C-alpha cells in the first residue's frame, strides 16, 4: 500500500479517484461510444470496460485487501465475491462498482450517465460515490457521517410541495401491469420523468430534483451507493413489499423513495393500494 494511502477507505480519496477515472475513461469516449449488446441483452461499451479495469487497478493499489465486484464481471465471479463478503462480516469488505450506469443513455448520446461505487463491509454500505459525468457532479456519502454534493453538505429540501404537486421519477417497464396502469391513469403526482440512470435517480431524489421515486428491479451495483447517499441526506426508501432495499445480496430489488417523511408515507400508501387494485 502506498505510504500516502489511508489505512481504511476514506470518502475524499475514493471520490477523487472515481471522478478522475470518469474524466479519463468515459468523457473522451462520449462522442463515439460504439455500443454492442451483451448476452443478457443489455448494452456495453469500451468505456464500461476501460472504467472497470482502471478503477479496479487503482483501488487495488490503495487497498489491496479489498476485492472488487464489477457489473462487467461474469455472474459466477460476482456470486463468489458476494458470498465471501457475506461470510466474513469482520473482513475488509467489498467494492461494488457500476463502471457506467446509464449505458443506454451514453450509447444514444443522452447526457445522463456515470459510475457508481460503494464499499460494503459488515453487511452495510459504508461509503458511496456517484459521478454525473456531464454535469461534473460528485455525490458522496459515508455511513453515519452525512452526504455531500461536490464537497458541500447535501440534505433533502426541508419544504417539499404537497403530493399532488410533486415530480416523480418512474421506471414503468419493470413494474407490474396493475401498478403501471394505475400510475398511467390516475397518478397522485403532478408530472413524471425517467432519466435512465438508477444511480443518479437516487442522487436526484436526495438533491430534491425528484420528490418521489419508483423502480421495480435494480441490481446491487445500481443502487448500493445511491441508497446510502439518499439515506444520509435525510431521505427514505423501501422495497415494494416494505423491506430495506439493501439486503447485502445480489438479489434484484425494487425501490419506493421520497426525500420527505410525510411524502414518503403518502407515496408508499398510494403505491401499496395501487399495486393491489383490480
Image (tube, grey):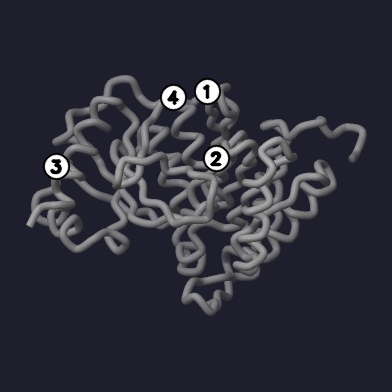
- Choose the circle earlier in sequence order: 2 or 4: 2
- Choose the circle earlier in sequence order: 2 or 1: 2
In this rendering, would 225 be left or right of 235? right
Label number found at residue 153: 1
Q: Is residue 96 above or below residue 163?
A: below
Instruction: Characterize the local packing of mark 4: few (<14), some (14-19) or many (20 or more) Cα atoms within 10 angstroms.
Output: many
Label 3, secondary structure: give it: loop
Label number found at residue 155: 4
Residue hosting label 3: 188
Q: Is residue 149 above or below residue 254?
A: above
Could you tell me if the residues under marks 1 and 4 are in contact, i.e. CB atoms within 8 Å? Answer: yes
Q: Name the front one of labels 2 and 1.
A: 1
- Where is residue 267 drawn, in percent x and y? 22, 37
Residue at position x 53%, y 55% in the image:
250
Label 1, secondary structure: give it: strand
- Choose the circle earlier in sequence order: 3 or 1: 1
Give me the C-alpha separation between circle 3 and circle 1: 31 Å
- Where is residue 61 drawn, in percent x and y? 84, 47
Give me the C-alpha separation between circle 2 and circle 1: 13 Å
- Quadrant including the C terminus: bottom left
Give me the C-alpha separation between circle 1 and circle 4: 7 Å
- Where is residue 259 drawn, in percent x and y? 34, 31
In this rendering, would 181 be left or right of 200? left
- Choose the circle earlier in sequence order: 2 or 3: 2
Name which quarter of the figure residue 212 lies in.
top left
Residue at position x 49%, y 75% in the image:
40
Label number found at residue 137: 2
Instruction: Characterize the local packing of mark 2: few (<14), some (14-19) or many (20 or more) Cα atoms within 10 angstroms.
Output: some
Amino acid at each position: 500500500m502506498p505510504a500516502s494511502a489511508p489505512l481504511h477507505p476514506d470518502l475524499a480519496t475514493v471520490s477523487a479517484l472515481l471522478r478522475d477515472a470518469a474524466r479519463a475513461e468515459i468523457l473522451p469516449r462520449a462522442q463515439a461510444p460504439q455500443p454492442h449488446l451483451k448476452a443478457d441483452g443489455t448494452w456495453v461499451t469500451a468505456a464500461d470496460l476501460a472504467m472497470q479495469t482502471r478503477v479496479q487497478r487503482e483501488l487495488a493499489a490503495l487497498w489491496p485487501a479489498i476485492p472488487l465486484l464489477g457489473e462487467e464481471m461474469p455472474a459466477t465471479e460476482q456470486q463468489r465475491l458476494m458470498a465471501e463478503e457475506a461470510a466474513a462480516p469482520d473482513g475488509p469488505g467489498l467494492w461494488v462498482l457500476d463502471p457506467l450506469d446509464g449505458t443506454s443513455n451514453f450509447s444514444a448520446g443522452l447526457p445522463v450517465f456515470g459510475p457508481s461505487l460503494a464499499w460494503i463491509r459488515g453487511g452495510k454500505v459504508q461509503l458511496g460515490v456517484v459521478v454525473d459525468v456531464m454535469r461534473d457532479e460528485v455525490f458522496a456519502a459515508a455511513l453515519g457521517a452525512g452526504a455531500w454534493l461536490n464537497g458541500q453538505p447535501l440534505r433533502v429540501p426541508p419544504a417539499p410541495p404537497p403530493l399532488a404537486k410533486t415530480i416523480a421519477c418512474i421506471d414503468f417497464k419493470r413494474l407490474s401491469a396493475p401498478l403501471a396502469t394505475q400510475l398511467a391513469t390516475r397518478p397522485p403526482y403532478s408530472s413524471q420523468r425517467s432519466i435512465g440512470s438508477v444511480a443518479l435517480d437516487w442522487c436526484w431524489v436526495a438533491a430534491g430534483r425528484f420528490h418521489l421515486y419508483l423502480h421495480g428491479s435494480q441490481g446491487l451495483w445500481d443502487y448500493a451507493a445511491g441508497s446510502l447517499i439518499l439515506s444520509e441526506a435525510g431521505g427514505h426508501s423501501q422495497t415494494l413489499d416494505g423491506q430495506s432495499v439493501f439486503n447485502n445480496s445480489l438479489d434484484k430489488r425494487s425501490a419506493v423513495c421520497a426525500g420527505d417523511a410525510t411524502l414518503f408515507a403518502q407515496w408508499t400508501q398510494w403505491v401499496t393500494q395501487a399495486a393491489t387494485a383490480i
